[in-house]
Amino acid sequence: MYSYEKTFNADAEEIFGKVHKLLKEANWLILSYVDVKEVFTKMDKSIDPYYILDVCYPPAAVDLIHDNEDIGAFIPCKVVLIQHGKSTRLIMPKPSVLSKEYLDTDGKVAEKYETALIELLDKINS
């Protein structure tokens, strides 16, 4: 499977807040995020809440880039929150799978940090 996925019985804004708090406490950064619903609204289109987050752990970036400089095509990690009704689905593409598939690497360095991120995201409950 190319991604980690989890569904919560909560709205996307609540899960966004929990993700932000957890990452901050573990010294991960949300480098940027896109509120897709807000972008669509400006175009007079409608969509349920939908966030795309660029997530980074700076020591991981150092290790990953030293492993294979082309990994920049797959980092920072993406965390996507998609609300459907009263539930929210979280999706995170796995850099280890992408690096094994598309780069000359065994994916072990990427897997180390994606596992750490997944363990953090698994702490979120709703």
Image (cartoon, helix red, strand yellow):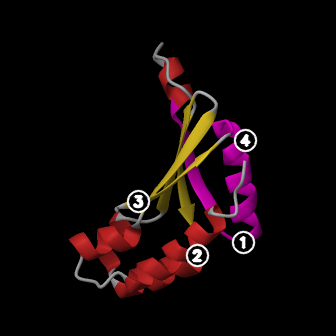
Label 4's element?
Answer: helix
**Residue drawn at 35 percent across, 61 percent down:** 2
Q: CA distance from mark 2 to mark 4?
A: 22 Å
Circle 3 residue:
3
Residue type at mark 1 is Ala
Assess whether residue 17 is covered by the magenta stretch.
yes
Circle nearer the N terminus (2, 1) = 1
Circle 4 residue:
14
The segment highlighted magenta reads: 10-36
Residue type at mark 4 is Glu
Q: CA distance from mark 3 to mark 1?
A: 21 Å
Marks 2 and 4 close (CB-CB < 8 Å): no
**Residue drawn at 66 percent across, 40 percent down:** 9
Marks 2 and 1 close (CB-CB < 8 Å): no
Marks 3 and 1 close (CB-CB < 8 Å): no
Q: Position of residue 25 (x, y in %)?
A: 77, 67
Label at residue 26: 1
Q: CA distance from mark 3 to mark 4?
A: 22 Å
Circle 2 residue:
116
Q: Is residue 48 visible?
A: yes
| Residue 33 in the image: above or below residue 108 | above
Label 3's element?
Answer: strand
